[in-house]
Amino acid sequence: MAVKKARIVIVGAGMAGITAANRLHSVSASKNLFEVCVVEGGNRIGGRINTSEFGGDRIEMGATWIHGIEGSPIHKIAQQIHALESDQPWECMDGNDNKATTIAEGGFVLNPSFVHPITELFNNLMDHAQGRMSTATTKGESGILSIGSFLRQGLDAYWGSSKEEKELKGFGKWSRKLLDEAIFAMHENTQRTCTSVADLLTLDYDAESEYQMFPGEEITIGKGYSSIIESLASVLPPGSVKLGRKVTRIEWQPERHEAMNMENGTRSRPVVLHFSDGSVMSADHVIVTVSLGVLKASIRDDDSGMSMFHPPLPSFKAEAISRLGFGVVNKLFMQLSPPHGTRDEHSRGFPFLQMVFHSPNSELRQKKIPWWMRRTATLCPIYNNSSVLLSWFAGEEALALESLKDEEIIKGVSDTVSCFLSHSVEFCNGNGNSEKHSQEYKVKFSKVLKSQWGTDPLFLGSYSHVAVGSSGDDFDKMAEPLPKCSSSSSHPSASPPLQILFAGEATHRTHYSTTHGAYFSGLREANRLIQHYSSC
Ligand SMILES: Cc1cc2nc3c(=O)[nH]c(=O)nc-3n(C[C@H](O)[C@H](O)[C@H](O)COP(=O)(O)OP(=O)(O)OC[C@H]3O[C@@H](n4cnc5c(N)ncnc54)[C@H](O)[C@@H]3O)c2cc1C
Ligand SMILES: *[C@@H]1O[C@H](CO)[C@@H](O)[C@H](O)[C@H]1NC(C)=O
Ligand SMILES: *[C@@H]1O[C@H](CO)[C@@H](O)[C@H](O)[C@H]1NC(C)=O
Ligand SMILES: *[C@@H]1O[C@H](CO)[C@@H](O)[C@H](O)[C@H]1NC(C)=O
Ligand SMILES: *[C@@H]1O[C@H](CO)[C@@H](O)[C@H](O)[C@H]1NC(C)=O
């Protein structure tokens, strides 16, 4: 009887897929156990890692930071391949602790002594939620539903314990309480981009303490995040990563029919993949690494018959997919036009600007600031004196950004900047008694580049989070292979095990939403197969 090598097809050439291929290859190369290939729907490897270039600087459209260097496998690889430094300037090459200038809408520069207490309050509350502070409550017993409601309770308690409202002079219509609230909201907006939620009221409170970070500083990668992926892919035999191969359908066999079992005396492969070009491929095992967004779309299409999985995924899996959260986060890069004249404002460099906005429905808000800028916390050069500015967007605002024309973005950001950097009360607030020497601050942008993770059909979002109504258990369900193990697996008519395995950022219970989470998940599924074959 002919013995075929097990064929493993990995769907997706992002961090999880390439890591799994790398691991399987390193084991298989010596023992000749598997036939491994990676099929990728896009025309490049890397997935949500997408290093690019803008204005002469190296930038990241997707994954940006190594979130804590101590114990990070990504950091280890970056060190090994000497990717941490570069001759070409790169995003955040001087770290992320540049001194920010905090300005309130209308051009009121805020003294750090104003901002600091609220920043400290916010950080303490987040530390508490993440379980880095004592008084840990038993899961579910806190009675608090979301991070958003927890934070607002904390702000209310802060106000309740502080002295009566202080007079505030020289800040236009801003009161102390409005300012506190707006500074707090600025930190909430940063949190929205970190967690990829549209609204913190939908971010589960209890799950937050399960999320793990590596200790140590957070840094970016000089030669680009893509250098990590390229390094992992470089050991794979030529041709094993196939680009432009979008999977449209995966047929598997939860219950195997004996008649289909034999084909010329050898086992036929239980899984069949269909591609958008009409081609077909069979496999013994498929590791699916597509994003949670793509999985959500694939189960939404169940009724229309467009579902990716045939038969459809079992309900435990489909329910975990629909309960977990997957939001949109986008990055916007803008290049400042070169300064004209000698004593131009720009020659001093654009500040690391933190923006404190009036709430979106406040009477006091500046009408010329577009709604999609109002929840943007920062607008900063990507390193000291760079002419490239960066802002992060989340939720609706991030999605809106994807459909805006470059000219609309340039106008919207320029109008916002002039409301913050023109140091004139009159200019922005229009209240009569302002200083008359108003100096309008005009910036000119020559070009923009934005990511489009929400609408790209290969991603349909940015990264996962635990939505209210979901829990850490759902990540474990995401990771379970199909068909689900049954006690009768030794029974001859049982279907072949490990037909569909799941890897990817959204299958890791404690490191979801990160590149290293994706990396660990790829290793986990490769090891699951290696172990399966070493024990039989
Ligand atoms: C804006 C942004 C900022 C981020 N910042 C950070 C950060 O600072 N630090 C950090 O650690 N992480 C960050 N992340 C998260 C990190 O990028 C991801 O967690 C990680 O890259 C996910 O890897 P993956 O392999 O799970 O998925 P992916 O990278 O999405 O890989 C899946 C692959 O499957 C392909 N695919 C999809 N559908 C099909 C199909 N039907 N057929 C074939 N192929 C298909 C896709 O094209 C993709 O290449 C960020 C992400 C974004 C979007
Ligand atoms: C950038 O500027 C800040 C202060 O403006 C300074 O503290 C920091 O060291 C600078 N970084 C580099 C790399 O020059
Ligand atoms: C193997 O089986 C297929 C049908 O499943 C048949 O078409 C083919 O001729 C067979 N090949 C051999 C070598 O027997
Ligand atoms: C930034 O520019 C200022 C003034 O032009 C200069 O003094 C400073 O050294 C520059 N910093 C860096 C890191 O290039
Ligand atoms: C990846 O980067 C390129 C620029 O190099 C950009 O055109 C593309 O839109 C990016 N992909 C996504 C999904 O943002």
Image (spheres, rainbow, N blue to C red):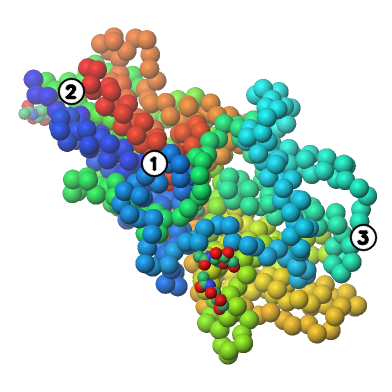
Left or right of 373? Residue 240 is left
1 or 3: tag closer to the N-terminus: 1
Query: Residue 425 at x, y = what percent?
Result: 82, 75
2 or 1: tag closer to the N-terminus: 1
Residue to which mark 3 is pinned: 167
3 or 2: tag closer to the N-terminus: 3
Query: Residue 448 at x, y = what percent?
Result: 51, 70
Mark 3 → mark 2, Cα distance in angstroms:
81 Å
**Residue type pointed to by label 3:** Glu
Disc 1: CA contacts within 10 A as few (<14), some (14-19) or many (>=20): some
Residue to which mark 2 is pinned: 267
Location of residue 428 with respect to 59 vertically, above or below? below
Q: Are marks 2 and 1 in contact (CB under 8 Å)?
A: no
Disc 2: CA contacts within 10 A as few (<14), some (14-19) or many (>=20): some
**Residue type pointed to by label 1:** Pro
Residue to which mark 1 is pinned: 73
Question: Which of the two residues, 157 or 61, is positioned nearer the viewer here?
Answer: 157
